[in-house]
């Protein structure tokens, strides 16, 4: 079966679309059957001229053009309602440079629209995160990022200072062994040199400060 192919030619500066030649290969060697094809090519004037082709090349042999996909011919004869569009570089032969410009513009417009959607989505996500952060920090959600960073840094510094203060208090009211009893260093006014207490010994587990540190309710707190 004869096959139709397009061979694209290098485009010149004066061409408004890529020039091409129409390639017809596998034409029948039988004269009568070839006449049928010749008639098809020449009916209603010159086919090359009507298609805008520079020429029509006809071969009895198979001529495979590397750029063309001829796999559609592998399935044998085409169904009667089959429709194949003649294309050059993936575009219909009626494609013109202005179509190209329009298609590029539409593509670029779509790309920009998608980009805007992505940016809007990112902004929404960022606004939600910012609201959550300002809420966690306990500051006004309208604060800028500089203020948010400053608040977080202050929070971290406060926490470090509080931890250091707690360590100092814990060290002051630390447990010491005295006459077989665990007493509070500070509350008992322990004298390390003489191994005596200036106050009556206070059992460490009765030290109000120690109990407050470990979260137990103290006698003092119950009164207030
Ligand atoms: Zn104590």
Image (cartoon, rainbow, N blue to C red):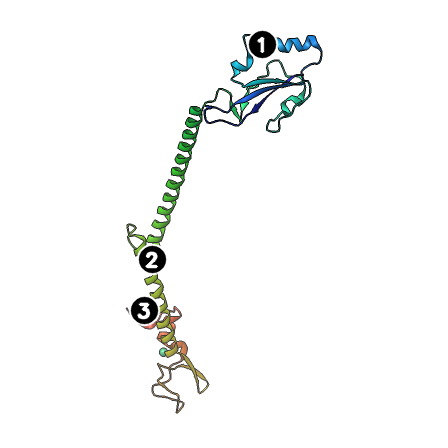
Write the residue at 32% across / 55% down.
148
Residue 44 appears left or right of 29: left
Question: How far apart in space, not on screen, are marks 3 and 1 (Cα)?
Answer: 112 Å
Kind of element beneath mark 1: helix
| Quarter that holds the N terminus | top right
**On residue 149, which mark appears?**
2
Determine whether the residue tagged by mark 3 lies in a helix, strand or loop: helix
**Percent of width and height locating residue 115:** 40, 38
Q: State which tag comes first along the sequence, 3 or 2.
A: 2
Observer-nearest of 116 and 24: 24
Residue 67 sits in quarter: top right
Ligand 1 location (quadrant): bottom left
What residue is at 34 percent from the left and 88 percent from the top? 198
Does any portion of residue 181 appear in the rendered image? yes
- Disc number at residue 42? 1
Mark 3 highlights which residue?
222
**Tags 3 and 2 in contact by the CB under 8 Å rule?**
no
| Residue at image point 60% right, 10% down | 40
Q: Residue 159's x, y, as percent?
A: 36, 65
10 Å crowding of disc 2: few (<14), some (14-19), many (20+): few
For the point 31% across and 72% down, which residue is it? 220
> Which comes before the other along the chain, label 3 or label 1?
1
Coordinates of residue 2 in the picture (x, y in percent): 65, 16
């Amino acid at each position: 079966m004869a096959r139709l192919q397009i061979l694209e030619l290098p485009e010149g500066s004066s061409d408004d679309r890529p020039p091409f030649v129409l390639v017809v290969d596998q034409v029948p060697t039988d004269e009568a059957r070839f006449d049928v094809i010749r008639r098809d090519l020449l009916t209603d004037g010159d086919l090359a001229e009507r298609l805008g082709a520079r020429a029509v090349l006809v071969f009895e042999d198979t001529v495979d053009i590397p750029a063309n996909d001829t796999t559609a011919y592998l399935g044998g004869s085409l169904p009667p309602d089959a429709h194949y569009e003649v294309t050059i570089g993936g575009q219909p032969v009626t494609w013109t440079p202005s179509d190209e410009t329009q298609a590029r513009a539409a593509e670029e417009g779509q790309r920009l629209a998608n980009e805007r959607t992505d940016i809007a989505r990112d902004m929404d996500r960022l606004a939600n995160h910012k609201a959550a952060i300002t809420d966690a920090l306990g500051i006004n959600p309208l604060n800028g990022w500089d203020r948010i960073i400053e608040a977080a840094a202050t929070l971290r510094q406060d926490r470090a200072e509080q931890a250091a203060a707690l360590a100092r208090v814990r060290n002051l009211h630390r447990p010491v062994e005295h006459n077989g009893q665990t007493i509070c260093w500070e509350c008992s006014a322990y004298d390390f040199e003489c191994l005596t207490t200036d106050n009556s010994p206070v059992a460490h587990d009765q030290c109000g400060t120690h109990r407050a540190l470990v979260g137990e309710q103290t006698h003092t707190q119950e009164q207030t």
